Image (cartoon, rainbow, N blue to C red):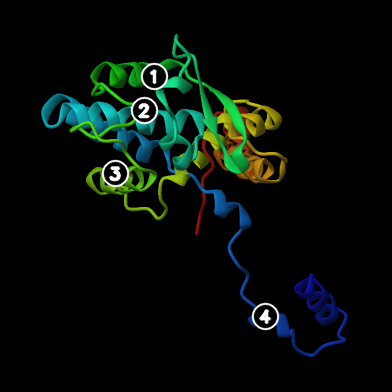
Amino acid sequence: MAKTLFNWAEEEEYLAKNPSLRLRLGPPKYKVVEPYSDEEVKALIDVCLYDCEHRYRFLGVRNLAMISLLADTGLRVSELGGIKLSDLDPNLRQLRVMGKGAKMRVVPVDGEAKKALKRYLNSRPPGGDELWKTDDGQGMSTYSIKVMIQRLKKRAGVNSYGRAHRLRHYFATRYLEAGGDINSLRLLLGHSTLDMVLRYSKYAGIQRALDTHQEFSPLNRLYNGRQKNNGERWGYRY
């Protein structure tokens, strides 16, 4: 707002020099919810699949189930870590999670995430009600899940900033990009208001604009239109 005022004052010659020229604009606010890319999530999954086949089968199966649920449901890591066997639907179509403020909600599970969870349950050491276990049968804490994801990132060559919470951002932005509505997303994520969801919506809208620029670029359409009408390329002389 101040910079706009100073620009106007300089143009109207009320000021000899615009003091706002030395001001530096901060980054766009939508970057706060910047998610992992598809390539980064795929790299995490690929490491898990490699472990399933070549190194530590149980760890690969378990970690794949965790990454799959985080990326496909938008769960917080604390919510993921708190899931009990008794929270699972018998048909693995849904699971209950305890969100912030002790608010319980139901999250759908299907497709690849359901396959990964079912595969883990078939390998899970018996005993106890906690869902996630180490290979020696001990329960996993939220902290140990965060450490696992950071190690997985390193092995996958994912060097971008951020931790497990960016998988929640990944789910939210991809959900909206695929056509999901913001109120449904609010319910799935467990938000009481639309404030945070609108940030995801803004980011998704910007991404759509960037992705469709080539299709709607005025200069590209100008060139292509001239080529189509004249049947030849433009030539330039310098």
**In this rendering, is residue 156 above or below 114?**
below
Could you tell me residue 217's position as x and y percent? Answer: 61, 41
Q: Label 3, on which residue?
A: 148
Q: Horizontal placement of 208 versus 63: left or right?
A: right
Q: In what element is the residue under mark 3?
A: helix
Residue at position x 36%, y 27% from top?
A: 131
Q: Which mark is residue 131?
A: 2
What distance separates the C-alpha of mark 3 from that of mark 4? Answer: 46 Å
Q: In what element is the residue under mark 1?
A: helix
Q: Horizontal placement of 128 versus 29: left or right?
A: left
What distance separates the C-alpha of mark 4 from that of mark 2? Answer: 56 Å
What distance separates the C-alpha of mark 1 from that of mark 4? Answer: 52 Å
Kindly identify the amino acid type of the residue bearing the numbered disc 1: Glu
**In this rendering, is residue 184 above or below 1?**
above
Kindly identify the amino acid type of the residue bearing the numbered disc 2: Leu
When asked about the image quadrant of residue 221, the answer is top right
Question: Of the residues under marks 1 and 3, which one precedes in the sequence?
Answer: 1
Q: Horizontal placement of 72 versus 210: left or right?
A: left
When asked about the image quadrant of residue 37, the answer is top left
Q: Label 1, on which residue?
A: 112
**In this rendering, is residue 15 above or below 140?**
below
Question: Of the residues under marks 1 and 2, which one precedes in the sequence?
Answer: 1
Question: Of the residues under marks 4 and 2, which one precedes in the sequence?
Answer: 4
**In this rendering, is residue 126 above or below 2?**
above
Q: Label 4, on which residue?
A: 21
